[in-house]
Image (spheres, helix red, strand yellow):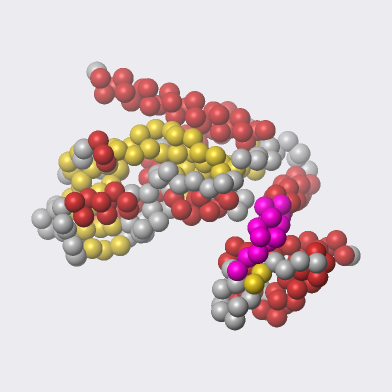
Amino acid sequence: MKGILMFKWLETFKVVYETKNFSRASEILFISQPTVSSQIKQLENELNTQLFIRSGRKEVLATPQAEILYERVIDLIDDWDNLYHAVQTNQQQIIRCVIGASHTFANYILPKLLIQLHQKFPQIRFSVQMMNSLEVLQAVEQHAVDLGFIEKPLSAPTIKRASLMEDQLVLAGDTQAGPWLVRENTSGVYYYTKRFLEEKDIGDPVIEVQNNEVIVGLLKQGFGCSVISERAAEGIAYQRLDDSFKRNFYLIRRKTSTFDAIEECAKFICQWSEAQENKNNEETIE
């Protein structure tokens, strides 16, 4: 019984650590805030250490002991989820792999890659989530995603990153008519858009759009202008930007992997990406 309670306390601890907020944690866990506070207090008593500093503000601060515990807890919960899934499906050979991909990669590269992954790794059950680059990094850190594809060189102590292929950015749409269609500041392309606007001393009007496909749809209807991937610019008037507006796509994953098959999958992705890059270079030369 105590083991079951301890597991509940650890799950509550994980959510509080990630949200830094007891009220938000209670909403996510569908339990009352006093219950969250009580479970954290019981966990602290059991471990005989303070995990969070409550300063009277809405946000709580994690102690160094909480940092250590969190690293172990996400591995523990991850292992339990995998074990539970294996028992429920009665197929020990089936492995789950959650892919998190930033918008451009998800729309224009992942479809081809996913077909290859499905054929190469029949024992892996893939699922795909689309989010911006920072959200992908955070999801990989929190074990919500196994393999992540991002469009900016983000890093973290528990994450390893591999460079995949280049992506040429272009200026699309009618810059004279506007308005500028800009992604949110945590997206991969935002840095380049912001830099371009600053270099050209361009101000408002700007419309923030948190989805690449919506931006592309607006551009195809002749509305607005934006800095987008050349891969997304088919059917839109655009001009290539200089080499400083080339970026890389990156594969990220945790330094400690639960399954060897996930590591094999990551190696295959790097090899496939290199082959695609070589093929594109040969076509460009021709």
Q: Residue furthest right?
A: 1
Residue in the picture at 71% in, 52% down? 72
Q: Using the image as rendered, state which of residue 45 and residue 99 is in the foreground.
A: 45
From this viewpoint, is residue 112 visible?
no
Q: In which quarter of the image is the C terminus?
A: top left
Q: In which quarter of the image is the N terminus?
A: bottom right
From this viewpoint, is residue 83 visible?
yes
Q: In which quarter of the image is residue 67?
A: bottom right
25 to the left or right of 176: right
Magenta span contains residue 71: yes
Q: Where is residue 46 in the image (x, y as percent from the top left)?
A: 82, 67
How many numbered marks appear? 0
Q: Using the image as rendered, state which of residue 202 and residue 172 is in the foreground.
A: 202
Q: Where is residue 187 in the image (x, y as percent from the top left)?
A: 38, 53
Magenta span contains residue 245: no
Residue in the picture at 37% in, 22% down? 278
Residue in the picture at 30% in, 43% down? 229
Q: Residue furthest left?
A: 176
Q: What stretch is highlighted in magenta?
A: 61-73
**Predominant SS of the magenta segment:** helix
Q: Image height check: is 83 above or below 124?
A: below
Q: Using the image as rendered, state which of residue 62 and residue 21 is in the foreground.
A: 62
Residue in the picture at 15% in, 52% down? 200
Q: Position of residue 71 (x, y in %)?
A: 67, 52
88 to the left or right of 2: left
Q: Image height check: is 115 above or below 200?
A: above
Q: Image height check: is 27 above or below 97?
A: below
Q: Using the image as rendered, state which of residue 107 and residue 40 is in the foreground.
A: 40
93 to the left or right of 278: right
Q: Position of residue 163 (x, y in %)?
A: 44, 34
